[in-house]
Image (spheres, coloured by chain):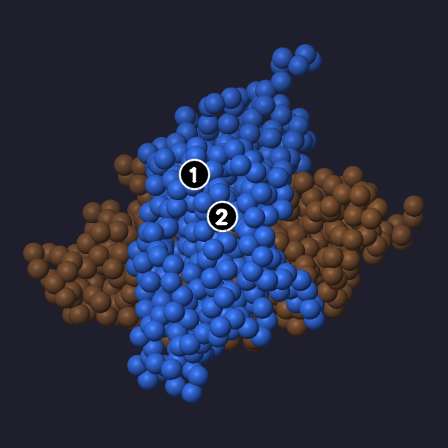
Chain colours: A blue, B brown
């Protein structure tokens, strides 16, 4: 067969709440898996009877094919009820598809069945849609709006600390000990009230804040830096914000104050340096230099890392973590990328500080989408 | 090679927040993907430096292998950084594994790489762990506790209707129109306060309630049946409850009252009939007969289904929908299964009614895990 007879499709079979490449391609929110394919610029989805009306009015695709049509045809031909893989394959064969580009985590069962039906499979390592890294102004507005609402929720959380009273080192509000859990509840329910879904919201103080993955638990103490790292999805648009602020109620130690000043300077430098054309690695190195020059070492002791030991940032959009990375790897910044800038310092026995904004890369600067001022002491 | 030299493993590579078969096998909560395999009764996970401490103390497995050990070995051998698929394959080869049973939706990219390394792949259609359908008393207690807390949240939602005042057909509370959104917020934040995560909570009245997938939106009206279908995950255990109640504020029509009586009778019959050894299909048929005998027809008109057109129930556990099904298929009930019993009636132009409890199948009865009484009018 000549090469000309080959017809290639991009194929995804997933739920668009889980698979953001599918949401990106279709703009159709559906929790249950459905088949999608694209041949050239033409996009198709196959929808069940339950979803076909909504799919036709909401999905940004050229064709919505009825699942029942293929199910009936297959039932007639084979005498057996057809599964979603069979229906997808039937539609691909109808369109003459001989090769499929699928996400790296495409279900092996479906891939193998496609192969048995003569369709070659190419598993694509991320990014599946390289263009997704560049956001258009609608997407930028969606992140800006998510950031605005997330900032409101963070403010309400910080207010809990501000209104609390220290007693014997612990913080109390309305007669109850203030805890990571109680403050997180205030933040998460403020998000919910605004149509955002917060998962794994971090409100962590003291030793817990030294582990960037610790969500925080138990009583919050006076003089402790408390990290708020909040990264919800705005459910109406599907876009995320990812914002971190660190505050202290009561008197922080001189060391902790110095740490905060260093992180603030480093984070501002990151925001100031980023722009189209720059190598993100340079910015990451410049931030590390700020810490080094101020005498904040990075290293390991007793099996725990200390100092600044994570990346400077990452892309944010339909996923809360997506390309590009801002860290120790070469990565040229491009107009329309949205990235976080989130340096931090962590010293077991002292505390953790992190500050994070979301910025959009413009031709000659980075536009900050987060409009919260940066303050540390809330006394 | 003789058959004796074959060594088979069950293999999963996923995050345990997404893949509940992995959570079931390990009882280890992790949002980021990690490799798991089981050879005979012996379970292994491979953990990153960041997670290894928590994995060793929390995961219910025999061995926690350090990811860094395999990464270093591979880097030394190949000169390139190793991905998670390479690390999994290295560990499987070290243990002499030649065949892998993987979930049907195992990533094709990893499966293909395993094959190139001489490991045969068998994609298993669900259920991956057949035993998961039978719950032990700890699991039953986990669902009972999730149901208790979910019931509290539903009560608070119903209270919103009870406290509201009808005016020109609409319901008002504290001077504001009561909406699906405002009531859902009360339910979802009550869940959050109790450590449960509610997703897609349904508070739907009137015409919307006739589509069992509609979450509900806009003002709620007097005399409308309003469906509360709440199915959150209790985050500390990972187990779900799934409860539905339908109530009305103001005077319902005679027809709607009859519908409610029919659904209540049918649902009670389902709870009364279920026990170990019975065929679930019989129970589903008996429920359909209740509706038929009371004159409630099931059919289609103008492209919309009406009457009772969904299954009677489904298993509930780490997933909100899991095997077995209670519907038009043969399925023998076994001791320790937890299933929903949720008949409903839906008539466009009139309204929708559904009542749902979670029951555990015992030797000679079904034990109801939901302790909310069933009432309709909340005046």
Which disc is residue A270 wearing? 2
Determine whether B115 is above or below A349 in the image: above
* Residue A204 image offset from top left, x and y in percent: 48, 69
Image point (74%, 61%), residue name: B66
Q: Nearer the viewer, residue B35 or A72?
A: B35
User: Could you say whether the residue bearing mark 1 is in a helix, strand or loop?
Assistant: loop
Q: Is residue A209 left or right of residue B101?
A: left
Mark 1 belongs to which subunit?
A
* Residue B233 image offset from top left, x and y in percent: 46, 64
Q: Quadrant of residue A195?
A: bottom left
| Mark 1, residue position | A365
Q: Nearer the viewer, residue B308 or B100?
A: B100
* Residue B270 image offset from top left, x and y in percent: 41, 65
Q: Mark 2 packing: few (<14 Cα in 10 Å), some, or many (20+)?
A: many
Q: Mark 1 packing: few (<14 Cα in 10 Å), some, or many (20+)?
A: some
**Callouts 2 and 1 close, C-beta under 8 Å:** no
Image point (69%, 68%), residue name: A301
């Amino acid at each position: 067969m000549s090469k000309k007879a080959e017809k290639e499709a991009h194929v995804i079979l997933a739920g668009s709440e889980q698979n953001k490449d599918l949401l990106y391609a279709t703009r159709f929110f559906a929790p249950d898996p459905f088949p999608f394919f694209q041949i050239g610029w033409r996009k198709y989805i196959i929808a069940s009877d339950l979803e076909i009306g909504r799919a036709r009015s909401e999905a940004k695709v050229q064709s919505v094919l009825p699942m029942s049509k293929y199910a009936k045809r297959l039932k007639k031909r084979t005498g057996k009820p057809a599964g979603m893989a069979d229906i997808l394959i039937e539609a691909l064969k109808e369109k003459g598809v001989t090769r499929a580009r699928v996400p790296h985590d495409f279900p092996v069962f479906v891939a193998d069945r496609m192969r048995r039906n003569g369709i070659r499979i190419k598993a694509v390592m991320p990014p599946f849609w390289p263009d997704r890294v560049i956001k258009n102004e609608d997407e930028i507005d969606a992140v800006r709006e998510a950031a605005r609402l997330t900032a409101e929720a963070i403010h309400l959380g910080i207010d809990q600390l501000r209104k609390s009273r220290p007693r014997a080192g612990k913080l109390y509000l309305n007669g109850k000990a203030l805890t990571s859990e109680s403050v997180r509840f205030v933040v998460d329910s403020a998000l919910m009230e605004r149509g955002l879904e917060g998962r794994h919201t971090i409100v962590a103080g003291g030793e817990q804040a030294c582990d960037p993955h610790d969500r925080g638990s138990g009583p919050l103490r006076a003089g402790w830096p408390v990290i708020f790292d909040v990264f919800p999805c705005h459910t109406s648009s599907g876009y995320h914000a990812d914002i971190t602020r660190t505050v202290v109620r009561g008197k922080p130690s001189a060391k902790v104050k110095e740490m905060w000043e260093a992180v603030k300077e480093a984070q501002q430098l990151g925001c100031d340096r980023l722009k189209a054309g720059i190598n993100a690695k340079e910015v990451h190195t410049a931030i590390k230099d700020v810490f080094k020059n101020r005498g904040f070492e990075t290293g390991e002791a007793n099996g725990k890392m200390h100092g600044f030991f994570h990346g400077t940032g990452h892309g944010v959009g339909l996923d809360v973590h997506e390309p590009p990375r801002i860290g120790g790897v070469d990565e040229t910044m491009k107009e329309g990328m949205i990235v976080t800038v989130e340096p931090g310092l962590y010293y077991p026995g002292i505390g953790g500080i992190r500050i994070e904004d979301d910025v959009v890369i413009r031709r000659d600067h980075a536009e900050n989408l987060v409009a919260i001022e940066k303050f540390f002491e809330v006394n």
